Amino acid sequence: MRVKCTVNGQPQEIDDVWEGESLLYALRERMGLPGSKNACEQGECGSCTVYLDGTPVCACLVAAGQAADRDVVTVEGLAEDDELHPVQQAFLDAGAVQCGFCTPGLLVATHDLLEREPQPSDPEIREALAGNLCRCTGYEKILDAVRQAAATSAQSKAGPS
C-alpha cells in the first residue's frame, strides 16, 4: 500500500507499507526521522509521541496507513529554520536531557501543554507529562525545563520591555 501524508510540513509518500507497519517504523526507518524513539512498543512510555492532526499520539500504536492524508509533526518538526524551538532549548539549558531516550516524547508533550496552557501550574505539568517515563533524571530538571519554556514563551509574547 502507498501512504501519502504531510510530515513536518513536507508532503511524503511511503511505498510498500505493510498492514501491521507502525507510524513509528515508517517515520524512523522509511523517512529517516529518528527523533521519535522505539522503546516499549505498547504506548506506555511516551518516547514515540508525535502529533497526528494536532493531537499527540504514541506513534508505536498508530498504523502507518492511518496517517494517510493526515498531518504528522515529529520532534524534528518543532524546530523552525534550523533554530531550536524554545521548548527544545529549555530542555538543553535546564540540563533535562540525559540519555535522551525519553526526551522526544517529553518535548512533544511539553509543547502540547504550553499550547493549551501557557502558564501551567506544577500539578498541570505533572499531569501533562504523566504518560512519559524517564529512567535517568528523577524528573526535577524536566519540570525546571517546562517552567523555563513557559517563562520564555510568556516573555516572547509580552515583547520587549
Image: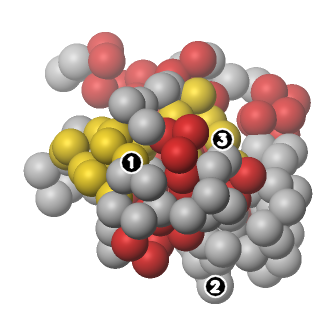
Query: Considering only vertical position in the picture, is 126 above or below 20?
Result: above
Q: Which residue is located at x 38 percent, y 72 percent?
A: 30
Q: Are marks 2 and 3 in contact (CB under 8 Å)?
A: no
Q: Which residue is located at x 38 percent, y 48 percent?
A: 3
Amino acid tagged 2: Cys
Q: Is residue 12 visible?
A: yes
Q: Is residue 150 left or right of residue 154?
A: right
Q: Position of residue 115 (x, y in %)?
A: 51, 23
Specify the quadrant of the image occupied by residue 98. bottom right
Q: Is residue 12 left or right of residue 66?
A: left
Q: Position of residue 106 (x, y in %)?
A: 64, 54
Disc 1 target residue: 3
Q: What secondary structure is marked by label 3?
A: strand
Q: Residue furthest bottom?
A: 99
Foreground residue among 121 and 18? 18
Q: Which circle's residue, 2 or 1, is located before the other in the chain?
A: 1
Give the CA distance from mark 2 to mark 3: 22 Å
Query: Considering only vertical position in the picture, is 65 above or below 98?
Result: above
Q: Is label 3 or label 1 in front?
A: 1
Specify the quadrant of the image occupied by residue 160. top left
Quadrant showing the C terminus: top left
Q: What secondary structure is marked by label 1?
A: strand
Callout 3 crowding tier (Cα within 10 Å): few <14, some 14–19, many ≥20: many
Quadrant showing the N terminus: bottom left
Disc 3 target residue: 57
Give the CA distance from mark 3 to mark 1: 18 Å
Disc 2 target residue: 99
Callout 1 crowding tier (Cα within 10 Å): few <14, some 14–19, many ≥20: some
Amino acid tagged 3: Val
